[in-house]
Amino acid sequence: MAKGKSKYICSNCGATFPRWYGKCPNCLSWNTLVEEKITNSKKGNFNIETEAIPKPITEIEENINLKRLSTGFRNLDEALSGGFITGQVTLLSGEPGIGKSTLLLQVASNIAKTGKKVIYISGEEATNQIYLRGKRLNALSGNLYILSETNLEVILNAIDKLTPEFLIVDSIQTIYSPRLESIAGSVSQVRETSGKLTEIAKQKSLPTVIVGQITKEGSIAGPKILEHLVDTVVYFEGERGQAYRVLKIIKNRFGATGEIAVFNMTSYGLKEVEEPSSLFLSEKPQNKAGSIIFPYTEGSKPILVEIQALVSKSFYSIPQRKTQGVDINKLSIITAILEKEAGLKLGDKDIFINIVGGIYIKEPAVDLPLALAIASSYFNKPIPSDIAVFGELGLAGETRSVYYTDLRIKECKKFNINKIIAPRFTDNNDKEVIKVSNIKEAINILFP
Ligand code: TYD
Ligand code: MG
């Protein structure tokens, strides 16, 4: 390869380098650098005559043509701050089989049934397969156009001819541009095809949803650039073997983040769950140690979830630590805090954590309930079902306040959970909110 004709992009972190490395110098992951040929690189100085004049922000006119397009699902519209907006590009990602194609076919048909032309491009399934699914989902509509195609140029042509009002591309990893030599799904192809589709969406003011597959490691295949490029990033999550699906807005240039919508996968497609809290608590065991209620929220909609911990004697030289629904590193930190600040002897114990319902919880408010669930299993003493807990823990075992206090407390009361253990500086004067300064104090209250 002639010098200067290629650059190398890390498919993990997106950093670029002039030469290849086995280990990415930026994020230190192995075998992630892929070659990309540099084409059309113009030589010479910048052309300073090319002009663009910045405007004072007060003189910018509001674009009154921006319209919201309802998805036909009330909770999904709410999570999207009112539905899809003109020209908005959304990335929907999730593990294979979670229900991305099912959800989008339902959304596509809901929009088509309002009289708008919708085009669903699938690079994964044949038209007949999509028809059969559409029939089962009661999603057939004369305005819903299906194209089974992977060549970007053919796709762009079809969009141009059909002039749709809503576009779905399922999935970006299957689409290729014939202008590049690399195979579909490679970093350079994903960049090129998603970049082009975004450009078209903006040009034609076409709301577009692009499906992104998730790799085994849990990141969206292709560089981070895909997330940077789009306006909105949506994750679709759920537990294998369970029917609940949680849709979460991770990024949104046109609305709030942290919003969620919960669905139930039935044999006739996805149905919205109106009261996720009662669904998630419906199977909570009574009077069992290790189970606790946590009012979770990262946006405007709180959900009561059950956290389960199982602490048992280990038969291994290195005890087992496993989590589902929270980061394993969080468990390590909480375990260390419990050892040091509350005197629990966990060094020879296996610890398993499960967030029931399939939500993956990243917010720090989960720390205190997680610690108390572990303590409950350790002491083999149940926590009463009319108690809920939230709060962050510092490394010294101190509690720290979190966001959305009032929303959490309100959701607890709605389900007759009247005692709430919260961090000391929580800004709420409700008599039934028990404020604790540290983990030790919380343990003393629950397990006297
Ligand atoms: P799918 O939408 O194909 O997942 P993805 O596009 O994320 O890979 O969903 C596949 C799963 O959903 C499959 O295991 C079958 C199940 N399913 C139902 O349970 N009910 C239905 O009505 C449909 C269409 C699928
Ligand atoms: Mg699919």
Image (spheres, helix red, strand yellow):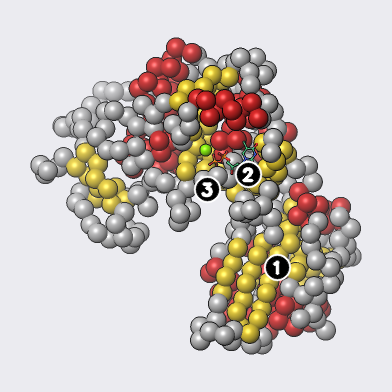
Q: Secondary structure at mark 1?
A: strand
Q: CA distance from mark 2 to mark 3?
A: 12 Å
Which mark identifies residue 95? 3
Is residue 211 found left or right of 307 in the rendered image? left
Q: Which residue is mark 2?
A: 247
- Pick the front one: 288 or 44: 288
Mark closest to the chain's N terminus, 2 or 3: 3
Is residue 415 found left or right of 157 in the rendered image? right
Mark closest to the chain's N terminus, 1 or 2: 2
Residue 197 occupies quadrant:
top left
Residue 29 pos. (x, y %): 34, 60
Q: Which residue is mark 1?
A: 308
Amino acid type, label 1: Gln
Mark 1 CB near ligand 1 (8 Å cut): no
Q: Residue at x 76, y 67 (%)?
A: 292
Mark 2 CB near ligand 1 (8 Å cut): no
Mark closest to the chain's N terminus, 3 or 1: 3
Mark 3 CB near ligand 1 (8 Å cut): yes
Mark 2 nearby-residue class (10 Å; few <14, some 14–19, many ≥20): many
Q: Secondary structure at mark 2?
A: strand
Q: CA distance from mark 3 to mark 1?
A: 24 Å
